[in-house]
Image (spheres, coloured by chain):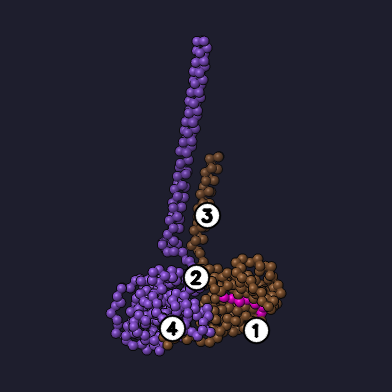
Chain colours: A brown, B purple
C-alpha cells in the first residue's frame, strides 16, 4: 500500500513539475509586443479638481495634493518660493536639463509638469496619437516651443485640466502639464511660458 | 598475576568476538534489506519504466522547444518591444559604384533624399558622402528629406533643408551632414536619444566651437534649444567626417576635429549609439 502511495505521489509530483514548466514557457512566449501604455484615463468632475490619472508618472492631483505629500516625494532637486505665495518643487527627470515640477499655492498643488521618457521601453512613454485617441481633438494646437524647438507643438485640453508638448512628426510626447480646468487663453497666460510661435530661426552657416 | 592476565586476555577475546559477531549480524541484515529492496524495485520495474520513459521524453521535448522558440518557428525570438533603431545595413563596398548618369535620380532612388537645383559636381559629392555613410543607420534616419540648393544652409521644415553649394568637398560634406543631423533630432520617427544627449551636453559642453557659441543666431535668440540642437548636429557631423576640420559656421572659425585624440568621449559614444559603427 505504501509503495503504491509512493509511486502515485511521485507521478503527481512529476506531472506538477511538467505543468509548472509549461506555464512558465507560455508566459515567455506571450510577452506583450509593445512597451507599457499609460493607465486608462479618468476625467474627474467637478472641474476644479485636476485630472487624476493621465500618466503612471503623475505625482499629484491638482486641487487636492497637499504640501506635506509633495515634500515626501523622492528626488527633490530644488524648492523655490515666489512672492506671489507659490512654491515650486523641482524633481529629477528623464531630461537632464528639464526637471519635473510641482507648483503649490495655499497648501494645494496647482500645476504639475511631467517629463515623459523618450525611450519607448520606459514606463510612462506615450505617443501623441495615443493621447489624442483617448481624449479626442485638442481645443488648440500651437506650434513652436522655446525648449523643444520650432517643430514641437503644445496640445491644449485646458477645459479638462491638461496640455502636453510633443513633436507631431516623431509622435513623441515631451511633457504633460496638469492644472485646474480653465479656458485656453488663461492656460497660455498662466502656464504657457514655453510656447513660442513662429518659423524656425534661420541658421545661415556661411552668410 | 599470570592467571589475572589470562582472565583479562580471555575477556578481551570474548569482547572482540562479540563485536565481530554483532558486525556480521549487521552485515547480514543490511544485505537482506538490500536484497528485499532490490526485489521490490525489480517487481516495480514493469510499472515504472514506461511511465518514466514517457515523462522523460515529454520533458525533454518541451525543454528543447522552449529553448529554440515558439513551436513551429524554431529560432524565432519571442515578440518583444520594438527596437529603437534598425540594424545597420550591410557594409557597402569601400568605393562607391561608378556614378550613374542621372545622379539626382540615383540619390533619390538609393537614399530617399531629393536634391533640387544642385550642379553635377555637388550631386557627385553628395552621392559619394551618402554612399560612404550608408553603412550606418544615417540614411534610415534621414530618408524622405528634400534638400534645395540655396545661398546658405538651414533646416526650414521638418523634412526640408536649404543647402549652399560650398566648396571644397570637405566643407560641403560637413554642411550636408550637419543639416541632415538636425533632421534626426527634430523630425526622425526613430528614437533619437535627445534626453540622453541633454545629459552628455551638460557634462561635456558643446562638442565644437559652433556648438558652444551657436553664433549664427542673434544673441537674444540663443536659448537652450539652439545650443542643444546645434550640439546634436555637430556630434553627428564630425562622427561621420572624422578627418574633417571643425568648420561648420564661418563665425566659429576652424578647429581640429573634436574626436581626435579620443576627445569628447561621451559625444562620440552617443553618436555611435545613434548611428552604429563608423567608419
**Residue designated by label 4:** B251
> In front: mark 4 or mark 2?
4
The residue where tag 1 is placed is A186
Q: Residues within 10 Å of mark 1 (few under 14, many from 20)?
A: few
Q: Name the residue under label 3.
A: A20
Helix, strand or loop under label 1: helix
Q: Mark 2 to mark 1: distance in Å?
A: 37 Å
Q: Residue furthest right?
A: A106
Q: Mark 4 and 2 residues: CB-CB less than 8 Å, in contact?
A: no
| Left or right: B260 as drawn, with respect to A19 | left
Q: Where is residue B56 in the image (x, y as percent from the top left)?
A: 45, 50
Magenta span of residues? A175-181
Q: Residue at position x 36%, y 85% from top?
A: B166
Which image quadrant for residue B136?
bottom left
Front one among B13 and B186: B186
Q: Element under label 4?
A: helix
Amino acid at each position: 500500500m505504501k509503495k503504491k502511495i509512493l509511486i502515485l505521489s511521485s507521478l503527481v509530483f512529476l506531472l506538477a513539475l511538467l505543468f509548472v514548466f509549461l506555464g512558465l514557457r507560455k508566459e515567455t512566449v506571450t510577452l506583450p509586443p509593445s512597451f507599457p501604455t499609460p493607465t486608462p484615463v479618468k476625467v474627474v468632475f467637478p472641474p476644479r479638481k485636476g485630472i487624476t490619472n493621465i500618466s503612471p508618472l503623475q505625482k499629484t492631483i491638482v486641487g487636492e495634493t497637499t504640501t506635506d505629500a509633495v515634500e515626501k516625494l523622492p528626488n527633490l532637486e530644488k524648492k523655490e518660493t515666489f512672492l506671489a505665495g507659490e512654491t515650486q518643487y523641482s524633481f529629477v527627470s528623464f531630461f537632464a536639463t528639464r526637471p519635473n515640477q510641482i507648483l503649490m499655492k495655499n497648501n494645494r498643488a496647482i500645476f504639475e509638469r511631467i517629463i515623459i521618457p523618450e525611450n519607448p521601453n520606459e514606463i510612462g512613454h506615450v505617443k501623441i496619437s495615443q493621447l489624442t485617441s483617448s481624449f479626442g481633438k485638442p481645443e488648440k494646437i500651437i506650434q513652436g516651443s522655446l525648449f523643444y524647438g520650432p517643430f514641437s507643438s503644445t496640445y491644449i485640453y485646458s477645459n479638462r485640466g491638461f496640455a502636453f508638448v510633443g513633436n507631431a512628426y516623431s509622435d513623441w510626447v515631451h511633457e504633460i502639464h496638469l492644472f485646474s480646468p480653465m479656458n485656453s487663453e488663461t492656460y497660455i497666460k498662466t502656464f504657457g511660458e514655453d510656447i513660442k510661435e513662429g518659423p524656425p530661426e534661420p541658421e545661415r552657416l556661411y552668410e | 598475576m599470570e592467571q589475572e592476565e589470562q582472565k583479562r586476555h580471555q575477556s578481551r577475546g570474548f569482547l572482540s568476538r562479540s563485536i565481530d559477531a554483532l558486525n556480521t549480524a549487521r552485515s547480514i541484515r543490511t544485505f537482506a534489506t538490500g536484497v528485499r529492496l532490490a526485489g521490490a524495485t525489480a517487481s516495480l520495474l514493469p510499472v515504472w519504466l514506461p511511465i518514466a520513459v514517457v515523462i522523460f521524453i515529454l520533458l525533454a521535448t518541451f525543454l528543447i522547444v522552449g529553448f529554440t522558440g515558439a513551436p513551429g518557428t524554431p529560432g524565432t525570438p519571442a515578440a518583444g518591444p520594438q527596437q529603437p533603431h534598425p540594424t545597420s545595413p550591410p557594409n557597402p563596398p569601400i568605393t562607391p559604384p561608378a556614378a550613374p548618369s542621372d545622379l539626382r535620380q540615383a540619390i533619390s532612388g538609393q537614399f530617399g533624399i531629393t536634391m533640387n537645383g544642385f550642379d553635377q559636381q555637388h550631386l557627385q559629392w553628395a552621392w559619394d558622402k551618402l554612399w560612404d555613410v550608408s553603412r550606418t543607420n544615417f540614411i534610415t534616419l534621414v530618408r524622405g528629406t528634400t534638400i534645395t540648393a540655396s545661398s546658405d544652409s538651414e533646416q526650414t521644415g521638418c523634412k526640408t533643408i536649404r543647402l549652399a553649394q560650398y566648396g571644397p568637398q570637405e566643407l560641403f560634406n560637413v554642411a550636408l551632414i550637419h543639416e541632415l543631423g538636425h533632421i534626426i533630432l527634430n523630425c526622425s520617427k526613430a528614437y533619437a536619444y535627445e534626453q540622453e544627449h541633454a545629459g552628455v551636453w551638460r557634462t561635456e559642453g558643446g562638442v565644437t566651437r559652433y556648438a558652444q557659441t551657436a553664433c549664427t543666431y542673434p544673441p537674444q535668440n540663443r536659448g537652450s534649444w539652439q545650443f542643444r540642437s546645434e550640439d546634436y548636429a555637430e556630434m553627428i557631423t564630425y562622427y561621420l567626417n572624422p578627418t574633417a576640420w571643425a568648420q561648420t559656421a564661418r563665425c566659429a572659425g576652424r578647429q581640429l576635429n573634436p574626436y581626435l585624440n579620443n576627445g569628447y568621449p561621451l559625444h562620440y559614444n552617443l553618436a555611435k549609439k545613434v548611428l552604429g559603427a563608423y567608419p
